[in-house]
Image: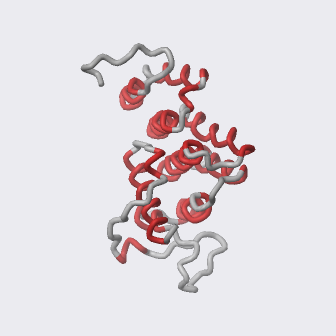
Amino acid sequence: MTAQSMKGVGIAMLAVAISGVAAAFSISRAVSPPAITPAARTTIKASGGCNGCGSGEGESVIAAAAGLSGDAAVRMAQMENEIASRARATLEDAEFLHECAHGTDDVFVQRWAIALASDRLATNRCEENARAMMERVIIDALYHDNWRVRRTGLATSEECGLVAREDVAARIREMRDDERPEVAARASYVRLPGDPPLSSEQK
């Protein structure tokens, strides 16, 4: 995959994370990225990057475009430059994504990690011993205190097929009465096993 294609994947994931509509299958498609102004491309180095070497290694285009800095930028760089570029995600990758989604308080990083875990599951690009932890990234999002993270969990659980699990389906049914109307509405759109078929007006 070319550098331009990788940036395209990154921009697609950026749109997913911002909008909250985690279309995991779209994440893996390379799209032409929009122009990013020089000011937005401020160099952000991940830990271990060569500071000032000018190679661009360790930078996160997405973190720069989103205006992230510090720990959030470092996490984004690892997700964008390492995990997203691997043919198959490892257990260590899955554990890192879970920590980003549930051990930080930056909603941008949280949603990005959940979307990336969904993509690895939907496209079967994780090692078998990493699958359970990847699933936990998304399932735990359904119970998150932040309603935006819960809504991301809803979208991603549908996109990667976790709604077929009885425990996930049961949780989503509960979320149709979520205290946040945005979450309750999104949960009502998720088609679960046993749901009545949509009428022609609802389709």
**Residue sitting at x 70%, y 48%:** 127
**Residue sitting at x 60%, y 50%:** 100
Between 150 and 129, the one nearer to me in the picture:
129
In the picture shown, does residue 82 fall above or below 105? Answer: below
Measured from the top left, where is residue 167 in percent x and y?
Answer: 61, 23
Residue 174: tell me if it is visible. Answer: no
Q: Is residue 200 left or right of residue 77?
A: left
Q: How many marks?
A: 0
Measured from the top left, where is residue 124 in percent x and y?
Answer: 61, 45
Residue 48: tell me if it is visible. Answer: yes
Question: How was this image coloured?
Answer: secondary structure
**Residue sitting at x 47%, y 24%:** 175
Between 46 and 158, the one nearer to me in the picture:
158
Q: Quadrant of the C terminus?
A: top left
Measured from the top left, where is residue 46 in percent x and y?
Answer: 60, 69
Between 138 and 28, the one nearer to me in the picture:
28
Question: Which residue of the protein is positioned furthest toward the right in this rendering?
Answer: 129
**Residue sitting at x 56%, y 84%:** 52
Q: Is residue 13 left or right of residue 49?
A: left
- Quarter occupied by residue 169: top right
In the picture shown, does residue 50 fall above or below 3? Answer: below
Question: Which residue of the protein is positioned furthest toward the left in this rendering?
Answer: 201
In the picture shown, does residue 172 fall above or below 86? Answer: above
- Quarter occupied by residue 155: top left
